[in-house]
Image (cartoon, rainbow, N blue to C red):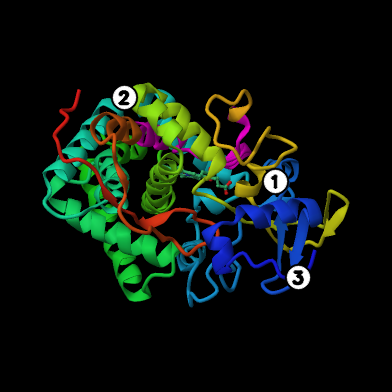
Amino acid sequence: MSHDFDLNSPENIADPYPSYARLRTEAPIYHSADPDLWIISRYDDVRAVLRDPDRFSSDVGGLESDPFNPGLEMPRWLTGLLSRISAVRVLLTSDPPDHTILRRKVSRAFTPRRMAAWEPRIREVTTRLVDDMLAADHPADLVHDLAAPLPTTVIAELLGVPTERNDDFKRWSDNLINGLLTGGPRIPMVRSAIAISWFFLRTIRRRRRDPGEDLISLLITGEGDEALSQWELITFCILLLAAGLETTTNLIANAMLAIFDRPVLRQQLCANPELAAAVVAETLRFDNPAQGLMRVTRTEVTLSDITIPAGAYVIPLIGSANRDPDRWADPDEFLLHRPNLGEHLAFGSGIHYCIGNALARIEATAALEEIARRLPDMAPAGTPTRITSPVLRGLRSQPITFTRTKIPAR
Ligand code: HEM
């Protein structure tokens, strides 16, 4: 393959799927010299990398610059900073045995049963946001008015953030995520990270004295090794914001883009809002918010006959694996009810499999159902603004119109 594949090019950000198809056929294990990375694009190889933490480590903290955002001066600062505070292990960037211990500690807070118990409240929040959109007298924006505030409100409630701190919480998490993932300004990001750590520190102290029903209270209790240490808990709360907000926002946005482009799909969904879960499931395959992850090789590894040296940075491209024709029939078609849909890699695979997957699906399903019922003629009212990241696929904004006749919530 010619040496012109650039993850960060504007064409690739706008629509990466044609480049992924070229990579899969011409250079499935592609070495990019600058930045020095190995890009893995076929389904079987991507899955193999994700399921092999012995050879492909998640501990990528030593990377000096961010290949996804070359313009960012200190882009991976948070993981870098945290990994320097000794004894603090971060779930996402740790390997066994540390990962195994941490994962066991936090998993009990994210069981499907616990997440399902949140569903009625998630639906209430969604209904209220749509009420506000219908009542507002300013032009509406899908991201600003629904897709972003839904996961932020839900995570704030899950963590038991008091309602009067909701605005601060929203501002801190926005600044953090903007700076961390999409090249936003650094100073507000650092200030917000400090503010949010301090906020969580005080919250944790309060919950120790006076526990509630929230996730923080749950995670500080437990016998012996079960409880998280103070810093483990602070970094975990921050990880939840970084991993759970933008991704869910973009799942909702990407699903709506698919619907805007497909009148028949829209008709089906509006006639049967219960199809929302199936639309969300296919969006996760078809246009997943998390397009690529990162690993570093611990030893020399041969993958599909190509040898990758030890210490190399590897990008398993989930977005490409999910469109691999060797795995999916008509991969570029948006089809409901694919027989093998459960095999998509949108939430990763193996030991780091997304802990928030059930929550994300519940939120996106609630949003799509509510739109189908109450804003059935929602349509774009201008060009969307894309997030300029090759790993995080989604929208910063999408102006929309809809008929403002109030269709009551069911
Ligand atoms: C559509 C929404 C989401 C997508 C596409 C997504 C995607 C992913 C992926 C691909 C991974 C694996 C990372 C790796 O292997 O390196 C992951 C891990 C993780 N996700 Fe999600 N995620 C979503 C929503 C959420 C939510 C809502 C939360 C929590 C509130 C969350 C929390 C986490 C955490 C804590 C991990 C680390 C798990 C570990 O390292 O063991 N995610 N996510």
Work out which quarter of the rendered image holds the N terminus and state it.
Answer: bottom right
Q: Amino acid at mark 1?
A: Val
The image quarter in which residue 338 lies: top right
Residue 50 horizontal/vertical position (percent): 66, 44
Q: Report if residue 347 is visible in the image.
A: no
> Is 396 situated above or below 324?
below
Disc with the residue nearer the chain's start (2 vs 1) = 1
* Residue at (30, 71) in percent of width and height: 188
Which sits in the foreground, 283 or 183?
283
The image quarter in which residue 273 lies: top left
Name the disc covering residue 3, or none. 3
Name the disc covering residue 117, or none. 2
Q: Please, which residue is most extreme toward the front here?
A: 263
Side of 223 where 208 appears, left or right: left
Side of 256 where 400 appears, left or right: left
Q: Amino acid at mark 2?
A: Ala
Residue 28 horizontal/vertical position (percent): 77, 53
Disc with the residue nearer the chain's start (3 vs 1) = 3
* Residue at (62, 47) in percent of width and height: 318
Which sits in the foreground, 375 or 349?
375
* Residue at (76, 64) in percent of width and height: 31
Q: Are marks 3 and 1 in contact (CB under 8 Å)?
A: no
Work out which quarter of the rendered image holds the C terminus and state it.
Answer: top left
**Residue stretch in magenta:** 342-365
Comparing marks 3 and 1, which lies closer to the viewer?
Answer: 3
**Residue under circle 1?**
46
Distance Cα–Cα, label 2 vs label 1 = 33 Å
Distance Cα–Cα, label 3 vs label 2 = 50 Å
